[in-house]
Every structure is written in structure tokens, then in C-alpha cells.
Amino acid sequence: MSFLSRLLGSKDVLPQRPTGPLTQRLEKLEAEAQNAAPGYVGTSYNRAGDVALRSGDRDRAMGYYGRAIDAFLEDGQREAARGVANKIIRINPGAARALCTLTWLDLAAKHSATAMLHLRDYIAAAKEVDEAALAATQIHEMARIVPDSEFLGAVADALDGLDYSSRATEVRKWATEGGSTQALSDAEELSRACLKGAVNSNVRAK
């Protein structure tokens, strides 16, 4: 499933085939991405998004940016993925999955204050696109591995706002105990786990 379709909660839809003067340039960039060495796939998709955006095709740009984020995350390029996610937020401040990705990346970098800001925006965006169940799953997983009590308190409040009171109670208990039994105190281990969380942030709630 592509980043954009996960973001919107729709079926997997790749960017529509361009027409007119964009055709050759975008097809060349797609071919570059498909043939790129590991670590360079996301760059070509990001460039394709820029080309589409400059041409006024916002929807197609979002699709390419989404594919760029997926590629960067798979290659472990956290800051490149963050840059593209922020680009999506500038285009669409309510882009739920981009906000989820940014929250995970903030946690990976131990930027707790920024993580709480993105958490707030993510919950608001998730409600707008009827993604409450997915958001609850994502932030509960964040709380499971993050030992920061202030962040855990913010997650508990967010879970209450999503009407997941039992999970909120559990997370508040973790906050008073210094984290869940699975919380990761080692910075590198936590960073790797949060990057994995960003990669898997499309997992649907059951």
C-alpha cells in the first residue's frame, strides 16, 4: 500500500499517469527510481513530487512524496523521510500518516517536545479522516516502548480523546511506573524501534 493511500485510508492507488508536458520528465524520474541503487530510490521520487508540485498537480505530488517517504524509511534515512513528511504537512497540514511518521521520527531522535506537538496534530487529523482506531493502535505502540513519563501522559490524554479509555488507563499506569515492562531505555535500541514503527505506521487496527 502506498503512503498516500494509507494516509487517506483508501485502496492502493499509485499516482495517475501524467499527461501533457509532464509525461516524459515524470516517466524518466520513475525509471530512475526503479533502477536506482539502494539509498537513492527516495531521491528520485522526491524530485518527481517537486516536478509535479511546480506544475500545479498537488495530488500527483503527494503520491510521489509518499513513495519517497516509504523508500527513505526502508533505507533507514530518517532525516530525509522527515524532510519529505514536513513537505507534505506544508501542502496539507491535516495529513494524518505524515504526522504519525513525524511523531515516530521525533521519538527516534529523542525530541520529546516536538513529538508531543506532532502527537496532538496527528490525533486531530486522524479524527478528521475517521482513523481513530489506527491512531489509537499507533500511539499505544509508541507508549509501549517509550519510557518518557511526560510523553506517556500526553498519549493517555490522546487515547481518552479517541474513546479508548482502557488503553488510556494502562498508559497512565506505565507513566507512574517509569514505562511499560517493554520500554526501551537504551537510546540506540529505542531509536531503531521507533524507525521500525515509522516504517510500519500503515498497519491497520484490528
Image (cartoon, helix red, strand yellow):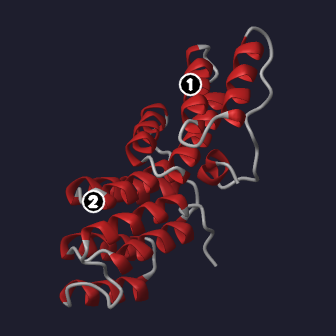
Q: Which quarter of the figure has residue 87?
A: top left
Q: Is residue 52 left or right of residue 85?
A: right
Q: Is residue 35 above or below residue 22?
A: below
Relative image position of residue 62 (x, y in whole percent): 59, 34
The residue where tag 2 is placed is: 116
Q: Is residue 64 left or right of residue 199?
A: right
Q: For the residue carrying disc 1, how many other residues have a C-alpha within 10 Å: few (<14), some (14-19), or many (20+)?
A: some
* Residue lying furthest top: 21
Q: Quadrant of the N terminus?
A: bottom right
Q: Quadrant of the C terminus?
A: bottom right
Q: For the residue carrying disc 2, how many other residues have a C-alpha within 10 Å: few (<14), some (14-19), or many (20+)?
A: many
SS of the residue at dot 1?
helix
Residue at screen point 77% across, 16% down: 23
Q: Which mark is residue 68?
A: none
Q: Are marks 1 and 2 in contact (CB under 8 Å)?
A: no
Closest to the camera, between mark 1 and mark 2, is 1
Residue at screen point 19% across, 71% down: 150
Q: Earlier in the sequence, mark 1 or mark 2?
A: 1
**At label 1, which amino acid type do we have?**
Arg
Relative image position of residue 196 (x, y in whole percent): 48, 64
Q: Which quarter of the figure has residue 185?
A: bottom left
SS of the residue at dot 2?
helix
The residue where tag 1 is placed is: 47
Relative image position of residue 159 (x, y in whole percent): 39, 75
**At label 2, which amino acid type do we have?**
Met
Q: Is residue 18 left or right of residue 152?
A: right
Q: Between residues 66 and 134, which one lies in front from this camera angle?
A: 66
Q: Is residue 165 above or below residue 99?
A: below
Q: Is residue 43 left or right of residue 171?
A: right
How many labels, in total? 2
Q: Between residues 21 and 169, which one lies in front from this camera angle?
A: 21
Relative image position of residue 131 (x, y in whole percent): 56, 62
